[in-house]
Image (cartoon, rainbow, N blue to C red):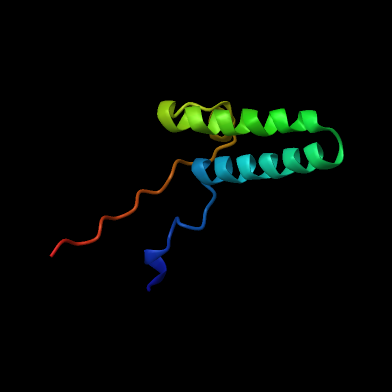
Amino acid sequence: MSEGDTQGRDEMTIERALRATAGFLVMLSVALGYWVHASFFLFTAFVGLNLFQSAFTNACPAMAIFRKMGLKGCVEAEAPARR
């Protein structure tokens, strides 16, 4: 693999930041629900519901924040050559 083949794949994109943030919030809310109070599990459900609706609408408040922070959109993958 040449250096040009992986260019852009290691930089943080909006989609990667969204997945990282959602994953962190789910882990945090589950831990808080277990060790602090069961009501924190409602926050876990909120994060999951927000991810579910954003899959269909492509709208998420966190995405707007990440755009303002200067993150770029996802790098398009190249389709494999057909034989």
Where residue 75 sits in the image (x, y, percent)?
40, 49
Whole-percent x, y for residue 31 in the image: 78, 43
43 left or right, relative to 52: right
Residue 11, position in %: x, y? 52, 53
The front one of 38 and 29 is 38
Q: Residue furthest left?
A: 83
- Residue drawn at point x = 38 percent, y = 72 percent: 2
Left-right relation of 14 to 20? left
Towards the viewer: 34 or 18? 34
Position of the N terminus by quadrant = bottom left
41 versus 17 height, above or below: above
Q: Is residue 36 visible?
A: yes
Image quadrant containing the C terminus: bottom left
- 56 to 27, vertically: above or below: above
Who is closer to the viewer here, 14 or 4? 14
Q: Residue at x 45, y 41 (%)?
A: 73
Q: Quadrant of residue 65?
A: top right
Residue 68 in view in this figure:
no
Q: Residue furthest right?
A: 36
Q: Is residue 33 left or right of residue 72?
A: right
Q: Which residue is situated farthest in the bottom direction here?
A: 1
Q: Position of residue 8 (x, y in %)?
A: 45, 55
Comparing 83 with 44, the one in front is: 44
The residue sitting at 53% across, 28% down in the picture is 60
